[in-house]
Image: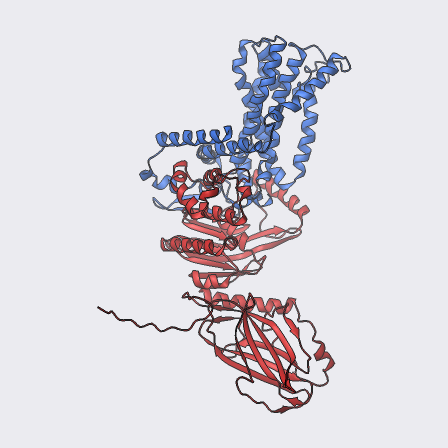
Amino acid sequence: MVKKALWRYTYTLLASRSRSGYRPTESLGMEDAIHSHQRRSCRTTVLDRETVEVEYTPQGVRRNGAAGWRIMFSELAESRRLIWLLILRDLSVRYRQSVLGYVWAVVPQTLTVAAFAFLQASRVLPIGGTRIAYVAYALWGISVWQLFAGCLSSCTMSLVSSGSLVTKVNFPREALVIAALGQPGFDFFVRLVPVIAVFGWYGVAPSWGIVLMPLVLLPVMLLALGLGFVLSIANLVIRDTANALGMVLSAGMFLSPVLYPPPVRWPFFLVNLLNPLSPLLTASQDLIAEGFLTRPEMFAAACVLALALALGSWRAFRVTIPRVAGYA
Amino acid sequence: MSTDTIISVEGVSKKFCRSLKYTMLHGVRDIARDVFGLSQYTNGLRHDEFWALNDVFFEVRRGECVGLIGPNGAGKSTLLKLLNGITLPDKGKIKVAGRIGALLELGAGFHPMLTGRENIYLSGAILGLGKDEIAEKFDAIVDFAGLEEFIDSPVKHYSSGMYVRLGFAIAAHAEPDVFLIDEALAVGDILFQSKCYAKLREFRDRGTTIIFVTHSLDLVSSHCSGALLIDKGTKMALGTPKDVIDEYNRLMSQRRASTNPPPENRAVEVNALLSSKKAEWTDLFTANPNEDRYGSRKAEILEAGIFTLGHDPVQVLERNREFLIKIKVRHNVAMPAAISAYSIRDVKGTVLCGTNTLYENIDMGQVQIGTVVLVVFRQVARLNPGDYLLSIGCGAWEAGEYIIYDRRFDYLPFQIIGKAPRIGVFDPESVVEWERLD
C-alpha cells in the first residue's frame, strides 16, 4: 500500500513539475528530436528541425574537451527522471515479497556492533578509548561504512544485474550506476533509527555540527560512485570483480576507523593516511563529537579526490560502455 | 548520403571472440585503449576472434520496410545492435538520420516484481519518453496490449504472450523514425501478431522505416518492400523480397547438402550392381531429415523434387504458377511399373491435395530389374502462402490388395509465397464481376 502510494506520489510530482517547468509541446521540434540516447556515443549533426544524423564509427564515442563534458552533463540532466524512477523501482521492489521488510536493513549491522560491544566490554579486544560511548561510536561508524560499502557494491553490480537492459537497449547506462546509489542511501536513513535510539540510550548529545553531516556523506557517496563506475565496467568484463570487491570490503571495514578509533602509532597510522575513506569517516565522527573538523586538510583532500575520481571515471565509463555493452 | 537515405552502412565489420577467457583479455585491452585514448586495434583478428559481420554495405531509404533474413548465427542481431548504437563497429561507418527505436528483446528492462503500470512508466523513461508523453499514450499502450485487466498485477505473473504484447506496445508507441525488430513477434498469438503487422503497416504508411529480422519468408514477401540476406557475417543479397528469398533458399539447400549428407540408402547399396543410375538431385534440395519412410522396397523412390517449368529446382513457389513434381522410381524386380503418387500436407499434417498415376490413367507397362522410371506431375500451385510438405510414394495392386513399395511422408518441405492475402489454404482464383442494381 505504502509503496503504491509512493509511486503515485512520484508520478503526480513529476507530472506537475514537467507541466510547470518544461517546454510546451509545440516548440519541442529540434530538441526533442535529438533524442538523448542518440546524442550520446556518436557524432551528432542536426540536419534540419526534425532530423538528426548520428554516426557510429570504431572510434565513435571519443569526444574531447569541454564539448564532451557539456554533453555528459546535459544528458545527465535529461536522465534525471529515469534515475529517479530506477531508484523508486529498486526501493519499491526490494521488500515486496518479504514480511520483515526494512528490518533487514538494520539487523546485520546491529548484530556486528553487539558482537564488538561484547568483545570491547569483555576486554578480549583492546579497543582504545572513543570520544563518545563505544556502542554509539561503533554503530555510527558502521552506518557510514555501510553507506559506502553498500553504494560501492550496488554500483558494481548495477550493469550486470540489469542484463538484457544493457545489451539490448540503448540509453544512458550511467543512469543505472547512479540510481544504484538510491537503495543504500535509503537504507542509511533506515539505519539512523537504531543509531538515534542508541544515542538516546547512552545520552550522547551530538554537537550542532551534525547539521553539516550531508556535506560529509555526499563525498562518501561520490567516492563510492567514482569507484563504482570503474568497477561496474570491470565486472561486466570480468565477473571476479564482484567477488573480489566483497572480500576487499570486508577487510576494508577493519582497516578503516569504523569499529575502533584510528591507530596513531607508526607504521599503523599509514593505513588511515592511504585510505581515502578514513578522513571522511573521521570527519563524520568529528561533527558528532566536537562540532568541528580535527583534520580539515585531510577532509578537503579526500573531497577533492572523491570528486575527481567520480568525474574521471564517469567519463571513462561513457567512453568504454559501447565497447563492453555486449559483455553483460 | 542522399536526403532520402535514412540508414547507410559503409563497410561495417564487427568481430567477436569465441572463448570467454580471451573475451576478458581482449575486453581489458579495449577498455585500456579507450580510456587512454589510443586507437583501437580493429583491423585484424586477435586470438580466438572471428568476424561476426564482415564488410557489410547497404543503404535503406526512408519509409522502406526491410526484412533481414539469414540462417542462425549469420549476424542479424549483431547488425541490429550496431544500427541501434549499442555496440560500435570495429570497421566502417554507420549513419542514421533519425530517431531509432528498437525492439531487440521483448520486455528488456521490465522488472518482474513491478506491475504492468509501473513497468510502462519505467520502460517509457528508458526509451526516452517524457512523463507527459507516457501519460498521454498510457491508455493506448494498455489498450493495444489488451491488458486492461492485469495492468496492476506484477509482470512476473504475466504469460509470455502478455509480456510480449506489453513490450511491443511500449516500443511501438515510442514512435521512432526507424524501428528495428529482432524476431520478437513470433511469440504472440495470431490475433496479436496480426495486430502487430497492422501496426507495422501503419508505421510504413506514415513513413517510418522498419527493419526486422524474421525466419518467415512469407512475412518478408507479404510485408516488406525489400530484403537483405546475410550469412556468416557477409551480405549475400539485397533487393526485392523475391530475389532475396530465392537466394536464401539456394543458400540453405547448399548448406544442407554440404553439412548433412543424406543417409546412405541401404537398398541402393544392396542393389548397387543392379543399377548404374544414382541419385542426382540430392544437392539441389533441402530435404526433410525427419521424413517418414516405409515400404517393402520392391520398387523404391530413388529421389524426388520440385522444379519450375524451366526444370530449375525450387523450394519456394509463387502462388498460381505452374510447377513440376518429379519422382524417380527404381524397380528392383521385373514387374508392371509401380504406381507413383504424391500428396501435399500442411505442417499440421492435413492432406491438402495429391494424385497418382493410377488415378490419372497412366499405364507404364512392364519394366526390368533396375529400370528407373521418371514420373513428372505438372500442376498449378493453388495453395495459399505458407509452409507445406511434399510426400511421395509408389506401390501397386497385387491380388486385390494395395501394396506399398516405398512411401516417403513429408519428404520435402517447400513454401508458397504470394502478395495479396486470401482466405484459407486454397486459392480458387475467384474472378469478381459486379454491377450496381438501382
Q: Quadrant of the N terminus of chain B?
A: bottom left
B182 shown above or below B265: above
* Residue farthest front in this picture: B400
Q: Position of residue B297 (x, y in %)?
A: 68, 80
Locate residue B226: give its quadrant. Answer: bottom left
Q: Residue at x 58, y 72 (%)?
A: B285
Q: Is residue A157 visible?
A: yes
Residue situated in front as seen by the camera: A118 or A61: A118
Locate residue B321: give its quadrant. Answer: bottom left
Q: Colour of chain A?
A: blue
Side (left or right) of A7 relative to B39 = left
Q: Quadrant of the C terminus of chain B?
A: bottom left
Q: Colour of chain B?
A: red
Q: Position of residue A169 (x, y in %)?
A: 51, 44
* Residue farthest left in this picture: B438
Residue situated in front as seen by the camera: A292 or A150: A150
Q: Position of residue A138 (x, y in %)?
A: 66, 16
A97 shown above or below B53: above
Q: Position of residue A288 (x, y in %)?
A: 58, 12
A34 shown above or below B216: above
* Residue farthest right in this picture: A124
Residue situated in front as seen by the camera: A175 or B183: B183
Side (left or right) of B246 relative to A286 = left
